[in-house]
Image (spheres, rainbow, N blue to C red):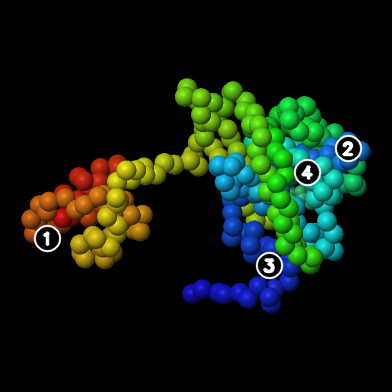
């Protein structure tokens, strides 16, 4: 069974809840801005992602408030000073990040409210968050306003000018180590996720290989009630079917094939079923 919704028939609140529960986990931009008087502001935004590598562009959206359609201080600051430092949020600072999202009056310094340390940027006026493991100094390239109703987003396209990374999260090759960065993401309602070791898994990509696809698998494999979609995708990830073993149908052993797939031995898996 499936339940379908017409967004125009939902309240703004219900629609927002539905969208945020389904589009998750979302990364969090901890956005540091400054107004023209030089008052700093720090607020989290999970309508956030990287949308281009060359040029390097980050996108986040300080939306109009759901209650009254009012605009947020971050938006006003960016109109006055079109620069922002986007700091990523790791587990060690998640409560402070949450505290900073309280709707303080314009001009209130959330660095102080949340007990975080402002440090000067190299190229832009807003401060960096010292505690954050990665800080992006950005120039605002464009602001795209999506409407004037409550909940309407304002897309802030940010050109990355400088990237600061704490060396404690780098691996031997100088790349950010997913096991060390300990990022958090936003789910719906009050829920977050944390990228702990147990939550991470690898999918070996069929790089350099023109994967044949699930559609090319023999019918008895493709329609097997024993194999999951994930297992079929692993089998379909090979370039071509191996030479058949000429197995009698009764000798086919899906259980052994599943074990091989789990262990990453795909060609071995075929030997039990093809
Ligand atoms: C984890 C988290 C993510 C959030 N994401 C967004 C978002 O993407 N867009 C938004 O408008 N508000 C978001 N909020 C709420 C803002 O942080 C909040 O409205 C904040 O007070 C805005 O501050 P400002 O008025 O100083 O800009 C989020 C809050 C939290 C805790």
Q: Select label 3 or label 2 by which is in front.
A: 2
User: Sequence order check: which comes first, mark 4 or mark 1?
Assistant: 4
Answer with mark 4 or mark 3, whichever residue precedes in sequence: 3
Q: Position of residue 216 (x, y in %)?
A: 24, 60
Can you see residue 148? yes
Q: Residue at x 54, y 26 (%)?
A: 170
Which residue in the protein does label 4 denote? 82
For marks 1 and 3 on the same chain, the one whose residue lies earlier in the sequence: 3
For label 1, the residue is 250
Direction from residue 107 to residue 16 in the image, left or right: left
Estimate how packed mark 3 is, as few (under 14), some (14 to 19) or many (20 or more) residues with alpha carbons within 10 Å: some
Residue ID at (83%, 39%) = 34
Q: CA distance from mark 4 to mark 1?
A: 69 Å
Q: Are marks 3 and 2 in contact (CB under 8 Å)?
A: no
Residue at 21 percent of width and 52 percent of height = 240
Looking at the image, which residue is at 82% across and 63% down? 69
**Residue 102 can be seen in this image:** no
Q: Residue 15's mark? A: 3
User: Does residue 16 appear left or right of residue 203 in this picture?
Assistant: right
Q: Which mark is residue 39?
A: 2
Compared with 182, 67 (above or below) is below
How crowded is the residue under tag 4: few (<14 C-alpha within 10 Å), some, or many (20+)?
A: many
């Amino acid at each position: 069974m499936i339940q379908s919704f017409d967004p125009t028939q939902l309240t703004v609140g219900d629609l927002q809840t539905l969208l945020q529960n389904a589009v998750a986990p979302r990364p969090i931009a901890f956005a540091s801005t400054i107004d023209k008087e030089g008052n700093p502001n720090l607020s989290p935004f999970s309508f956030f992602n990287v949308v281009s590598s060359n040029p390097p562009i980050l996108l986040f959206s300080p939306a109009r408030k759901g209650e009254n359609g009012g605009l947020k201080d971050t938006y006003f600051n960016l109109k006055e000073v079109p620069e922002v430092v986007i700091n990523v949020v790791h587990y060690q600072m998640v409560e402070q990040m949450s505290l900073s999202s309280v709707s303080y009056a314009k001009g209130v310094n959330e660095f102080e409210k949340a007990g975080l340390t402002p440090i000067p940027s190299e190229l832009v006026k807003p401060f960096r968050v010292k505690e954050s493991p990665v800080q992006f100094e950005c120039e605002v390239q464009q602001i795209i306003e999506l409407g004037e109703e409550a909940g309407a987003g304002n897309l802030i396209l940010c050109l990355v000018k400088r990237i600061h990374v704490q060396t404690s999260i780098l691996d031997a090759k100088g790349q950010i180590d997913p096991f060390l960065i300990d990022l958090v993401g936003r789910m719906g309602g009050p829920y977050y996720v944390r990228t702990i070791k147990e939550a991470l898994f690898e999918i070996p990509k069929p790089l350099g290989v023109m994967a044949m696809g699930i559609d090319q698998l023999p019918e008895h494999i493709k329609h097997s009630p024993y194999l999951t979609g994930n297992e079929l995708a692993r089998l379909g990830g090979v370039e071509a079917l191996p030479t058949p073993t000429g197995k009698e149908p009764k000798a086919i052993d899906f259980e052994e094939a599943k074990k091989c797939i789990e262990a990453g031995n795909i060609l071995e898996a075929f030997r039990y079923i093809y």
